[in-house]
Image: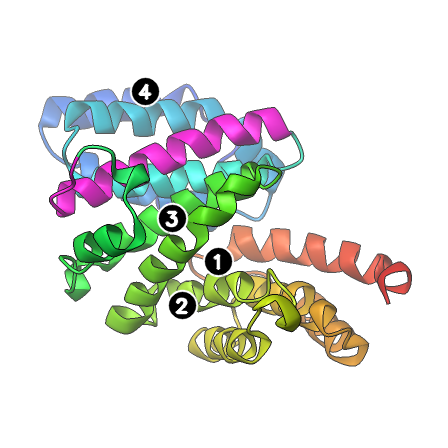
Amino acid sequence: MVGFPPATLRRHGTLLPLALLLLALSGCGLSGLQDGLSQAVMNQTDPQTIREALPTFLVLSDALVEADPDNEDRLAAAADLYSAFAVLYEQTPERGRLLSERARSYGERAFCSAADCPDGLTNLDYPAFMALLNELDDRDDVPVLFSYATGWLAWANAHRDDWSVLADLPKIEAVLTRVVTLQEEYRQGAAHVYLGILKTLRPPSLGGKPDEAKAHFERAIALSAGRNLGAKVDYAASYARLLYDRELHDRLLHEVLETPVEAPGLTLLNTLAQERAKRLLEGAEDYF
């Protein structure tokens, strides 16, 4: 997900077009502005502020892509931003679906800018998809791979009532596995978190792999030195609940609530993680 310098973004929508105009006139700094926007979003402590700034953020990101439509860095940053907002608007399904569509589209375009994509990328069978994925085998490819996977995941989450989404999961898992192979510490181990979630979507009797999921969650926590609170919340929600481990579930969530949310690149997600931890604890008696 993506930032301005880490300053509080409160109702400055009228300043952003002016900043963009000045940067455009100077002929430089556009990519830096998009990167800064991503970081400012992720370092914000107030999700409502970000929701209110949504139109300006997204139009700005779209404009940067339009100015250089084949730039994989701008496409990946746009995918990150739309993925983040799709999560923020998860409680309003129609808005979340629209945002996730754009997240997936930008992620695919970034991927195809880095790889030699054929027509009909989304309809490739698994072997053909893996052949394409194998073209991206360098650490420099990690940002594009990660943005592609998270944009796709945002879309899958917004369309989770559609059973056909299940057919995409092995491909998404393959992309995330490539990220872990090339640079597991990227985004403080976030790819491990997503892999942990994917491996707990089904119970063990139906092919789920909770032991592998546990290893992924614990590795993500270790790589972030415990600062990625979302890793602990997903560990509780995906693994502990799957195995009905109430002790682990409650311990992880209480740790999340006792940890400060401020962490570079994680503050917004940590704030949302604490909100989710409270809801999970409140509903624990009904679940367990």
Residue at 40%, 60% in the rendered image = 173
Res 250 quadrant in image:
bottom right
Residue 58 seen by the camera: yes
Q: Examine the rendered structure and indicate whether residue 192 appears above or below residue 99.
A: below
Residue 34 seen by the camera: no
Q: x, y (%) of residue 96? A: 55, 31
CB under 8 Å between callouts 2 and 1? yes
Q: Which mark is residue 17?
A: 4
Q: CA distance from mark 4 to mark 1?
A: 26 Å
**Foreground tag (2 vs 1):** 2
Q: CA distance from mark 4 to mark 2?
A: 32 Å
Q: Report helix, strand or loop for mark 2.
A: helix
Residue position for label 1: 266
Residue position for label 2: 188
256 relative to 173 in the view: left or right: right
Q: Amino acid at mark 3?
A: Gln
Q: Examine the rendered structure and indicate whether residue 19 appears above or below residue 181.
A: above
Q: Report helix, strand or loop for mark 1.
A: loop
Q: Report helix, strand or loop for mark 4.
A: helix
Residue at 33%, 33% in the rendered image = 105
Segment colored magenta: 93-118
User: Which mark is first along the chain, 2 or 4?
Assistant: 4
